[in-house]
Image (tube, grey):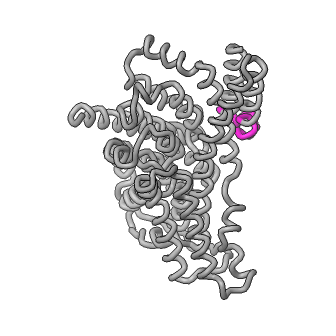
Amino acid sequence: MLASIVVIFVIAYLAIALEHPIKINKSSSALLGAGLLWSTYALCSGNQHLVEQQLNDSLAATAQIVFFLIGAMTIVEVVDAHNGFEVITSKIRTGKLSSLMWLVGFVTFFLSSVLDNLTTTIVMISLVKKLLDRHEDRLFFAGMIVIAANAGGAWTPIGDVTTTMLWIGGQITTLAIMKGVLIPSLVNLLVPLTVVSYLLRGREVVAPSTIEENGQLQTTRFEKNLMFLLGIGILVMVPVFKTVTHLPPFMGILLGLGVLWLAGDLVHRNKEELDKQHLTLAHALMKIDMSSIVFFIGILLAVATLEHTHILSAIAAWLDHSVGRLDVIVTLIGLVSAVVDNVPLVAASMGMYDLAKYPADSFLWEFMAYCAGTGGSILIIGSAAGVAAMGLESIHFFWYMKRISGLALLGYFGGIAAYLVQARLFW
């Protein structure tokens, strides 16, 4: 049975990693893998009641992450529909490319920590298109946006799917991850940002001659500000909600979603149905990336079979015996996340190491959040942010590898050095 489960998982994993060459959506591969793995486990196990109980437990854990992601993605869509992000992006104005790079880098970094790296990448690349005319300049900015978004998402529990998974799973807590990973994440951004801004020194910003309108009905300044502040406020208050009530984060995000929905209905209650249709939360629900949600469901349920059959614990024991050092093991996991999706990697790691041995906020989990979150920047296909940038600016895989990968690698190891020094000095 174990050999069959490993073979099925490896094939599904390869299909996910090779999504673009084989032209098969990774959500399909994840769902097929999950279905086949649980079917194999159920047929080969002698205890059907135990398998059913384990599946229910895995489903409950997966549902918490999925509900949280749906809520967060919907809130972001509502803010975007109201052009709420213009509250930030309209303030970015400078005549030097190097200065603009620093501004865009830091705005991306901190915006990603509150939203998520995928959404932030989309927002910032859309902004850069309005600021820069030369495609070559925009490519460099897109590459740096990917690095900044992934670095910014690694140090908060809501900035990246992997840190959200670790947070909901109890491996990290809000204040500890922010305190422990902020400096390494900043170093991860500052190293490549310094190099790129040096390369762009003396060059002027060439703005587009015309700015295209998106064709949507414009919202008022009050509506923009209200939805932006309310949306960001809800996302920021979710960790506070969890701390105060001790309820799972998805309950906080669902409560916030209800508040945002009510506010939207009240603000637009006197408008014609056609005028307010694209501003409603119901419309935002239709725009969220359900393909990604389905992928998370499939991969988390697939990895759960490896946990229940004790395959992951055996791999952890082998790594400890063969490599021995946790910092080396986690660094390698981060490098691998540049090639394959970091979600299954982190999901597997959560099953490999027991919370009883490695409690919340221990070195393993914080270092895992940093490495898995930022390692995906090394290749354009290594993160959701990279894949989004690839589509939005038509970035070629080898262009990114030639121009950006080395910078991302420098930032990755710079952040690792910063984290290890920090851990040695203060822990």
Q: Is residue 397 left or right of residue 131?
A: right
Q: Is residue 375 left or right of residue 9?
A: left
Q: Is residue 84 left or right of residue 62?
A: left
Nearer the observer, 115 or 93: 115
| Residue situated furthest front in the rendering | 49
x and y percentages locating residue 417 in the rendered image: 31, 33
| Residue situated furthest left in the rendering | 425
Residue 249 magenta-drawn? no
Residue at x-position 70% and y-position 48% = 291
The quarter in which the N terminus is drawn is: top right
| Residue situated furthest bottom in the rendering | 270
Nearer the observer, 355 or 333: 355
Question: Is residue 366 among the parts visible in the rendering?
Answer: yes
Above or below — where is 112 with respect to 168? Answer: below
Part of the protein shown in magenta: 17-30
Residue at x-position 59% and y-position 33% = 344
Residue 25 magenta-drawn? yes
Above or below — where is 342 with respect to 131? Answer: above
x and y percentages locating residue 20 in the rendered image: 70, 38
Nearer the observer, 335 or 129: 335
The quarter in which the C terminus is drawn is: top left
Q: How many marks?
A: 0
Residue at x-position 51% and y-position 52% = 249
Is the magenta region chiefly helix, strand or loop? helix
Residue at x-position 47% and y-position 16% = 319
Q: Quadrant of residue 286?
A: bottom right
x and y percentages locating residue 306 in the rendered image: 62, 24
Question: Is residue 402 among the parts visible in the rendering?
Answer: no
Above or below — where is 146 with respect to 216? Answer: above
